[in-house]
Image: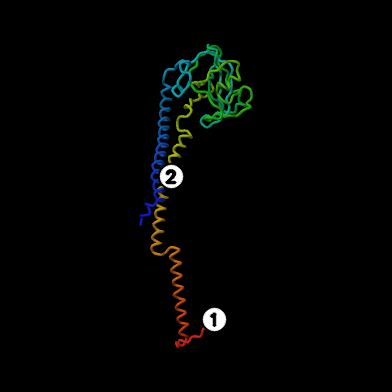
Amino acid sequence: MYRFLLTPRWWGINVFVLLAIPFCVFMGSWQLGRFEDRVQEDRSVTDRAAANRAEAPAPLDALLPVDRATSGRQATATGRYAEQLLVPDRDLDGEPGFYVLTLLRTDTGKALPVVRGWLPGDADTDAARAPAPPKGEVSVTGALQASETPGDNGVGARGGLPAGQTGAISAASLVNLVPYDVYDAWVTLARADAGMTAVPAAAPHGTGLDLKAFQNLGYTAEWFAFAGFVVFMWFRLLRREAEFLRDAELGLTGTGTGSAGGTEGESRAEGGAAIGAEGPDGSGDAERVTA
């Protein structure tokens, strides 16, 4: 019954199935591996963040440029505070508020953006609550962070901000607001100034359990579902073909039924002719009827 599996048509189907299933399983395993790598990376980032808080701070210039290895490490710098800006629309623990950002002029001539803390409220109406920076030369210590990109990683892209505010903490944005060079990095103080809450360091961009990690998990399920669908369709086609051939052998297909019906009709016609020839009284002299 299953000799049809050796036909050219089924050879093509079988080859496709034998290639599609391993491919789907491979792609699903690869996506699952990507998700597991991100889970492990998230654990490593968490462990590294705890280690960074406990380690001795290093000079700022020794940690630049910021990358995954140096992001979050404790950096120290010395200088004098200059312009102060507010960064609106920054939530902390689910509460809306804003950052207080102050530029620290160093001996190199560049300024280091320093997030001195977070305040609840609105940057437009509560700007007066931001404390003034300390006077004179100061040394700051905080977690090193890479410049932000507007519209990415939770950073707002709102434009048209009033004077004294910036939407993103990045050198590209700040050089348009101050008349001196700015480091392509910033720090968040480990201990916020009086009246403010310290801003925790963020994980490096592209690490941890972000949306892309769960996309990998979703793709894993899709590829394994594709493999199961291919197997299901192969069995469905096999069963349908076998049932069709069995029905044909039993004469239950459309052609067989029509032939049987035709034979049955002819038999009835012949029987009727015989009766007509015999006649109703059995004498055999039936009256001919012309249609």
Q: Relative to residue 288, is residue 78 depicted above or below?
A: above
Amino acid at the residue labelled 2: Phe
Residue bearing the label numbered 2: 226
Pick whichever, 113 or 3, lies toward us: 3
Left or right of 168 on screen, residue 259? left
Q: Residue at x 48, y 28 (%)?
A: 205
Left or right of 187 on screen, residue 56? left
**Residue 95 position within the rendered picture, expressed as x and y whole percent measured from the top left:** 54, 31
Pick whichever, 133 or 221, lies toward us: 221
Amino acid at the residue labelled 1: Thr
Pick whichever, 174 or 229, lies toward us: 229
Q: Residue at x 43, y 63 (%)?
A: 253
Q: Is residue 193 visible?
A: no
Q: Relative to residue 269, is residue 98 depicted above or below?
A: above
**Residue 47 position within the rendered picture, expressed as x and y whole percent measured from the top left:** 40, 27
Q: Residue at x 49, y 15 (%)?
A: 77
Residue bearing the label numbered 1: 290
Which dot marks residue 41?
Answer: none
Looking at the image, is mark 2 or mark 1 earlier in the sequence?
A: 2
Question: Could you give the CA–CA distance between mark 2 and mark 1, rounded to whole angstroms?
Answer: 69 Å
Q: Quadrant of the C terminus?
A: bottom right
Indicate the quadrant where residue 134 lies.
top right
Left or right of 41 on screen, residue 118? right
**Residue 190 position within the rendered picture, expressed as x and y whole percent measured from the top left:** 48, 21
Label 1 residue SS: loop
Indicate the quadrant where residue 55 lies.
top left
Pick whichever, 131 or 163, lies toward us: 163
Q: Relative to residue 221, is residue 260 depicted above or below?
A: below
**Tag nearer the camera, 2 or 1:** 1
